[in-house]
Every structure is written in structure tokens, then in C-alpha cells.
Image: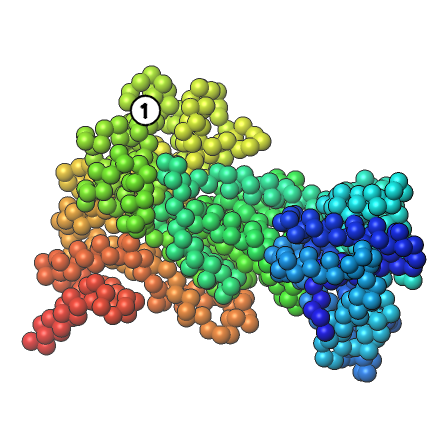
Amino acid sequence: MEPVTWAFILTSILGGIIGNRADAGFMRAWGNGTKALASRIRQGDRYVNDELEKAVRRSFLRALQTVASDSLEQLTEGFKKYRGSYVCSPENRQDVAWLEQYLKRVEKQIAQAENVDSSDCLLESVEQIELLVTPDGMLNETLVEQVKQNLIDSATQELRTPELYRRIVEDSLFERLCLFFTYEVKSNSAVRDIFQTQLLAKVNQMLEGQALTLESMQFSLKDITSSLPHLLSKLGLLEISVQQLGYSQEQHFSELTSILLSNTTTVEDVKALLLENRQVHTDIEKLQQEAKFILDEIHIDIGGLTLNRANIVAEALEKLPKTLLLEIGGVPGVGKSAVLKALVEHQKSQGSIVIFSGDRITGTGWNGYASYLQLTQPLDKLLLALSNGVQTTIFIDGIDRINEQGQRTVINDLFRILAELSGDGNDSHRWVVVYSAREENIQDVYRWLNWQALGTSVRLQVPELTLDELQRVFEHSPRLKPLLYLEQLSPVLKNPLMLKLLEDVRMLPNSEELPPLATEIEISRVWWERMVGDEGSITGRDRKNSLLRVGRRVVRSPGRLFPAEDDISPESIISLKSDRILLQDPERELYRFGHDLLEDWVMYRILDQHREELPAYLQEIGEPIGLYRAVQLLGVALLENSETADAWMQIIEEIEQASHLSFRWRQALLTALLISPHASELLNKAESLLVANNAQRLIELMVVLRTVKVIPNFSLIPLSVQTRPELADQLMPLFMSDPIPRWSIWKPFMGWLIKHIDNLPREIRLESSRLMRMWQTKTPIGSIYRREIGEISFKWLEEDEA
């Protein structure tokens, strides 16, 4: 049997059009028109080739779909579904199961036909069409009949094909194919234009003035399909409803043909389906507009150079098929959003995408957020429409920036609906969720996120820039190259956001006279004075004052959109927007910071202004969760900018005395030592204060390190939870009983601890041994500090036995 390609199917349709016509002139004209169409494809017109292929494939698959649907309808007449499957007579049960599975496969193939990557060789396609025409220009009717038989053989070649299905294929497959191709010609502008300009124009030239139109061509096809009154009547109902509703056939061809296959029997039924379908499509367009805005605001270049981070993206793509929940984690500014954006671009070619941003989610629960987006259809309908036979990837950028309970409910509602739909037994729907978050906030996200609805997440750690990536940046911006040889700048240069800021000429107008730039605090100071403040100019002072006014509002609700009040000059707003320090909502006079790190820097300056009464100020503004890192930066600044750690310790003590405050502020200040590239030097500076009172502070720091600066170990999840997700929430203590250290925080502390262990009070040994055990069990053999920890353990053992 010849392979049934799209070109052979088209050959069959074109042959069917001339059908019973005996006029040799007409047949010769039609044959030459067909040759002209083939010639156009041979010349490399991929557009003609691809659009015809899509149209033909859709028509053939729709024909198969109606055959299977009609077969199933006849076999299950009088029976109802139970738990997703028909309860029917025993003799038909196997045929019904086959038809149900077959329909699912065909639905997937129909969806994939929209993104077809031409599988036929272009030359083969041309040759197959040209075979239709004999050397004297006549149509080869024998070949047409042969192709028709090949179509039937192809549709019935599977084993255990139901007899009823086989009979309907033999009786009417070709007619059904012609019906749907007629609908393609009528409703699809791309196909209509191809036939009008490539085929019919040539035919009419040969007919010497006789006008063969698309309408007459469609009439010929409809004449062939007159034996299918039930499908033709549905087409008529559909066309009436389309005209009454003003529905765009060309834009929504796939949706309309899906409705055509439904069991509706009245104009009102069709109209109701069309109206709902149009509303769903409108809602999806609104989601796409939101996604476009979010993506447009993610700038991934460094001075015009885009680093594709190919290795990390490849790792993400390898993990995606293995999970329903992919977590993109990393330190602030490392490029998590850039990796997410790269994944979005890839997944667009694989199926549908939806994008949310933690900065833009608002309302209470999904219904509140849907109202903000002006969506009219329920979430489950939108998700089903998006995932019709294709994978849908849902992206959430900055999930850790969702701080309010109502906004968190938006995401948990989404996860709940996804879980319900995933459990409906329909394998044509598959969703995967990808979210990004700062690694320091991951544990807090797990506390509120309904992750168990989709199962445990697979983690992707976004690393700092590699040396090769740095070299590319410096080749693109040669004036930065001297920085590469300054070892003390290595930590900040490997951070894409820091490097992007340094690339701005205002930050480093003269690379030979560098200000201190080795830490985040130092870079934030240069950014504040040179980029925001414009070296003390009048405009710069106005920009500073405007940002401080913004900061006093934002500090009460970090991450939220804020209005530009009258006390902020329009000139400052325009200027700050031009530098992407502030971004504006596309439809409202609301703003947010261009990056959450910049927001942290401004909030830290507000906190520094209230340093002397920090406990009272935190209470006054409501202790917002999103303020954690700004408090931490305040602690780092006090340590880096002072000769001693006294000011840092004083604030810690004041926070401790305010018993009404959350413990997290004490943790933030205490761990500030560890987020600086100068962690070892800062620990040395604070050592005397840490070891005072039997090393009380140092022990407390180690406890926080062991219990807070870690990631839950989901490898401990028992198999029972996979079938009983309601238990997962109760098992979080189990996941935290053997957690995974956050290496970026642990590594500098463990290096300092091992170096000073002999001079530290014995009271720290119990807690030190717990840290050392975690290090030994969680790091690969041969990792840094493993040998030293082993030597310390033997030494302590010998001392105890002495």
C-alpha cells in the first residue's frame, strides 16, 4: 500500500471535484491548473505547501473523528457514562473502549496539526500531485480511485478495528473528507487565497472565458457529500449562527469545527456554544495580553548583550517532562526571571502557555484576580481550552513575592483546579507549573503553597555567571574588562543584575578610579549616588527624594503596585521610568520597581532612617513579610560600614527586648553576617560579641543556620502521600528533619567555623557537631571541608576519651 501523505489526500480531493464531468476540455483545464499549483510548490513556496498540508491534514483527521464519533454514538445509543466510561452491552464493550481511545488520539493529532513541521519531502509532495495529471494534460482517474482506496486502507489498518467503524469508513470517508475540505476552503482565508490565485486562475485561462469560481468548486464538493445529511445540517446550523453572532470564521476555524462535531441539534444550541466559545477565546486573549506585558518587563540583556544561559535552560528542559512542578531558585539578581523567560520562549513551540507575576497578582482568590483581569469564564474552562490535546505550561515569576493571604489564595485556587482536572482521567490534558523564587524564601513558600496538589517540586538552581559568560560580557563592553582582574570584585561580577548596573556608564565613568564595589551594599551606595542621585545635581536630588517618598509607602506593603502621589514630581517619575528604576502598569497610573532588588535597596534606606527606633517603626508599619531582606541589608550595612560590630549588636538587642515583634527580624539581623561576600571578615569582627555569655549568640546563629537556612528534603516523602495528598501538609516536619543546606549561606560559615574551632568555647560543640553531620551527609565525597571535619571529630573523640 502506498503511504497516505497529505499530497495524495489532496490528489484524491481534486480528483473528486471533477467527479462525473465528462467534458474533456474541463478535465484538461483542471489538470493544467493542478500542474500549476504543483509548479508553485516546486519553486519553493513553503507558505503554499505548509498551508495546504495543514488544511488537508485537518480535513482528513476531522473526517476520521466523525467516523469514530458516529460509530461510538451508534454503539452506545441508550446507554450512559459512568465514571467517564460508557456502560454498554458486553458484545460492544471492546469496540467502545477502542473508539474512546482512538478519539483521544485523533484529538491530539488535530491539535498538533496546527504546528505541523512538514514531514513530507517537498519534492515528493510535488511529484504526488503531478501524478494526478497524465502527459496529455488529462486527469488520471485511475490514480484517484487508487488513492481513495489507500485512504480507506490507512484508516482501517489497525488491528481490532471495530466492524461498524470499518463499514462507515468504506461507505463515507471520502465524502466526509471532502466536506471538511470544503469548509476549509470556505472558512480559511489562507487556503481560499491559494486556490483562488494558484489553481482556479489557471483553470479559467484554459476554459477560454468560462468562469469557474470558488463557489462552484464548493458546490461540486458539497454535491459529493450529499449522502451525509446529518453533517450537512449541522454545517447549515453553524453558518446561520455564525452570521447572527458576527463570529469570525477565519480566526476561529478550529473552534468552529469542534462545535460542528458536537451533538447540538438547534440553532439556539449552536449559538449558545459559539457565544461561550467566543467568551473563552476572549478571556484567553486577555491572559495572553497579561503574559506579554510580564515578558516585556523582563529585560535579560547586559548592556545590549543577551546571555542565553544555554546549559541551565537545557537542564530545565530535561527536568520538565519528569514533574508537574518545577522550581527555579537562586540568590537575588542571579537571573531566575531570565531563565524563566527563556523557558517560556521554548514552551511556546510545544503548546500553550500562561504567565503570572508575583508582583501583579491581586484580589482575594482566583475570582478576585479574574475580576481584575476582566475574565468572564471559570478557570477550569479556560484551562481545558488551553490544553486541548497539547501540553500547557503555567509560569509564575517571583512566587515568593506574593505576601498577602488573599493573593496566595489565587495561586492555591489555581493548583486546586489543576489537581481536579488532572484527576479526571483524560490524558489529553497535561499541565506543568514552573515558578521562580529566591532561595532564601523557598521554605516560607512551602508553608503556604498548596504544592501537594501537584506533587513535590523538582528544583533547578540558577548559578552565578561562568567565566566564559563573563568573558563574553567584557568583550561586548571592553571598558569593564579591567574589573575582571580585580579578585575582590568576583562575587558581584558573577551576578547578572550587579553586572548590568555596572555596565551603565554613570556607575563607572572612569574604570581607573573605582569606588568600593565588592559587596551589594557598596554597589547599592554607588547606584544611589551616581545613577539615582546623578552626582548631586538638582535633578538627582529630586530623584532621590522621590524614591524615598515612594519607599515610605512601599515599606508598608512590599511588592505591591503603588500610585504616584502629588508629592512626587512628574519629571522624576518620567526620569525614573526611563532608567527602568520604576515601571508603570500598562493601563493605570500605578508603578512598581524595575527589580525587587532595587526595591530592597530603597526600603533598606528607609529602615536606616529609622534605625534608632527600629522596633517601634516595624510595629507601626505592620511587620510586612516582604521586608525581611531589607532588614537583613540594614544589618549588613552596619557591619560593613563600621569598625566594630557594636551598632549591629545593639539593634539585635533592641529587637530582642521588643517581645511583641516577630522572631524573624532577629533572624534577619543575626544572619546578615552570612550574605556578604566578606562573611569571614564580618564574623571575625563580631566574634567577641558572638562568643560572649557562653557563646549564646553563636549557638543561636548555628541553630538558625540548621533550621531556617535550609531547604526541605522531599526525597523523604513516603509513597503513601502520592495517593493521599491530604497527608502531605502534616509531613512537613518530616521533610525538615533531614533538610538540605543552602550552600551559598553555609559555605562561608563552615569555613570560618573550622578555622576558628580550636579557639571557640566548648559550649558550641554540640551545635557544631550537628552542622558538621549535615555537611558530611549532604555533600559529595571529596567536597570542601569534609576532611577537616573528620579530623576535628577524631580530635574531639580523643579528648573525651582522655
Q: How is the image coloured?
A: rainbow
Q: Secondary structure at mark 1?
A: loop
Measuring 24% from the left and 39% from the top, which residue is drawn there? 481
Q: Nearer the viewer, residue 192 or 183?
A: 192
Whether 713 is drawn above or below 97: the answer is above
Q: Is residue 107 left or right of residue 338?
A: right
Quadrant for the C terminus in the image:
bottom left
Q: Is residue 530 left or right of residue 53?
A: left
Measuring 14% from the left and 49% from the top, which residue is drawn there? 684
Q: Residue 146: x percent and y percent?
A: 79, 69
Q: Residue 393: x percent and y percent?
A: 55, 55
Q: Is residue 254 left or right of residue 520?
A: right
Q: Nearer the viewer, residue 784 or 698?
A: 784
Residue most extreme to the left: 802
Quadrant for the N terminus in the image:
bottom right
Measuring 41% from the left and 69% from the top, which residue is drawn there? 715
Res 606 quadrant in image = top left
Res 283 quadrant in image = top right
Residue where numbered disc 1 is placed: 533
Res 137 quadrant in image = bottom right
